[in-house]
Image (cartoon, rainbow, N blue to C red):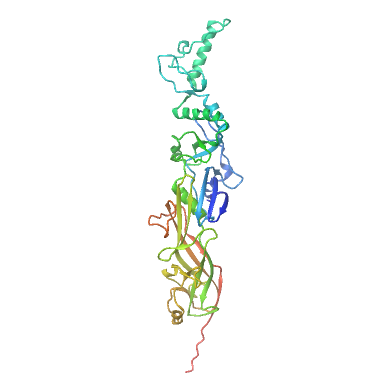
């Protein structure tokens, strides 16, 4: 599953406005099979209508700007779980506030028991009764006009009391939201920011959505601010790690360098080197022991971050023929990088010197390369394996830390060289005896 959005690269720093995260394509759920969800008719927020984009996946809005640093810009498939709770833009200080006021003004505040006259509601709404009686005596006195009969007056008063009783009551949390909306609605000049509607993610599990039951149904975020740190609403570190993995880019491989060059001979080893090419966006470096690695960090606007490292764990050789016709060698030290002659590139492969290569005889074992047992022309390739892991926080020097964990759902990454054609001739022996 791939998180998608629009992005703009600046050097090795990349910013992506994550408006949506795909959660269905990898699960094989057809976009057309998802029903639209209508908001329930209550004072508490239900989800707005949710549908599918024109693409092959349904999307869920995250409302976060994720910043990527390091070797980012990749395109690695991974399932990113839907957040338990989501916040969707609801309106500015005027339009959003007016909608909230309209909704909550149809809801009665919590009644306060009192032996005195009823307390007035916020915003000048009709007072609510102090008890549960529906009799006219429990309601504020009303002086009927001269033309009205006493029976009509009692009936009108009783109806008003009953209507107030059956209206759901505002919670303390909702009353605070209403008070804030009333202040913002009257701001002049208009206060800059956005109301967010918060609700359980309809695509998350029922258990996950339980995290949303205590969250405010509306949250005001001033311009330049971020959604507050609320459990279930913000992106957890593990999800950030998956986003970083989706962007991680490993080093590419140049063509292999073989020794001897040109033609090889049967039963004599051919030594192999391969050059690592740094990612177009990012950095390639090595650990203290010479193991190459890359990293990518995903960071939210409020400073939460997770970093994924990928280090070289293997160099494998495909000789282009069966094991009957070729024997490959790839010792552990083949994955330890050494610098090229000009000092500008990291190289994996054989650590034999020219003098040591010259001393190797027929059928002898080497550190990194291949010995062909039959003449012919073969398409040789080399593949480097990168193992990813993650830790919370920013990247630290020296490579993956000791607490680096497996990225859930992620697989090892590989890069392969272009095919190199190797011509192998058969050794001819001359017997003068």
Q: 61 left or right of 391? A: right
- Residue at point 49%, 36% (across, down): 199
Q: Residue furthest bottom?
A: 433
Q: Residue furthest front?
A: 189
| Residue 308 against residue 186 in the figure, above or below | below
**Quadrant of residue 19 within the rendered picture:** top right
Task: Give the total of numbered labels.
Answer: 0
| Residue 340 against residue 28 in the figure, above or below | below
Residue 201 seen from this side:
no
The residue nearer to you, when weighing 171 against 96, is: 96
| Residue 336 against residue 183 in the figure, above or below | below
The residue nearer to you, when weighing 5 against 413, is: 5
In the image, residue 356 lies at what x, y percent? 43, 79
Residue 396 seen from this side:
yes
In the image, residue 283 lies at what x, y percent? 50, 60
In the image, residue 329 lies at what x, y percent? 45, 72
Q: Residue furthest left?
A: 402
- Residue at point 40%, 57% (across, down): 401
Q: Residue furthest right?
A: 54
In the image, residue 355 lies at what x, y percent? 45, 81
């Amino acid at each position: 599953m791939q998180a998608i959005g629009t992005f703009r690269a600046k050097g090795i720093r990349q910013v992506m406005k994550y408006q949506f995260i795909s959660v269905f394509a990898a699960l094989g759920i057809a976009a057309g099979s998802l029903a639209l969800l209508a908001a329930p008719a209550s004072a508490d927020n239900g989800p707005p209508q949710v549908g599918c984009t024109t693409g092959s996946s349904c999307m869920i809005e995250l409302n976060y700007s994720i910043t990527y640093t390091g070797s980012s810009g990749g395109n690695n498939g991974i399932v990113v779980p839907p957040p338990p709770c989501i916040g969707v833009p609801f309106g500015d200080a005027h339009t959003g506030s007016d909608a909230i006021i309209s909704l909550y003004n149809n809801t009665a505040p919590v009644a306060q028991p009192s032996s005195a006259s009823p307390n007035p509601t916020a915003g000048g709404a009709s007072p609510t009764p102090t008890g549960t009686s529906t009799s006219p005596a429990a309601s504020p006195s009303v002086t009927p006009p001269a033309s009205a009969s006493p029976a009509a007056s009692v009936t009108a008063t009783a109806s008003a009391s009953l209507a107030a009783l059956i209206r759901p009551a505002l919670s303390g949390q909702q009353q605070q939201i209403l008070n804030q909306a009333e202040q913002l609605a009257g701001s002049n000049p208009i206060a800059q920011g956005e109301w967010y509607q918060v609700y359980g993610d309809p695509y998350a599990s029922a258990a996950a959505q339980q995290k949303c039951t205590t969250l405010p149904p509306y949250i005001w975020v001033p311009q330049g601010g971020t959604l507050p740190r609320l459990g279930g609403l913000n992106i957890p570190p593990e999800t950030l790690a998956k986003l970083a993995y989706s962007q991680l880019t490993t080093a590419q491989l140049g063509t292999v360098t073989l020794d001897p060059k040109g033609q090889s001979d049967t039963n004599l080893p051919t030594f192999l080197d391969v050059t690592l090419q740094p990612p177009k966006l990012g950095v390639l470096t090595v650990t203290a022991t010479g193991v190459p690695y890359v990293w990518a960090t995903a960071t939210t606007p409020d400073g939460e971050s997770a970093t994924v490292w990928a280090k070289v764990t293997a160099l494998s050789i495909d000789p282009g023929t069966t094991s009957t016709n070729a024997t490959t060698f790839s010792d552990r030290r083949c994955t330890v990088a050494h610098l090229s002659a000009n000092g500008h590139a990291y190289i994996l492969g054989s650590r034999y010197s020219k003098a040591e290569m010259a001393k190797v005889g027929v059928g002898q074992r080497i550190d990194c390369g291949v010995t062909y047992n039959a003449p012919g022309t073969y398409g040789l390739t080399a593949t480097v394996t990168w193992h990813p892991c993650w830790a919370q926080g920013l990247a630290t020097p020296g490579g993956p830390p000791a607490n680096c964990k497996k990225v859930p759902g992620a697989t090892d990454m590989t890069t392969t060289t272009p095919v190199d054609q190797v011509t192998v001739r058969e050794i001819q022996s001359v017997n003068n005896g």
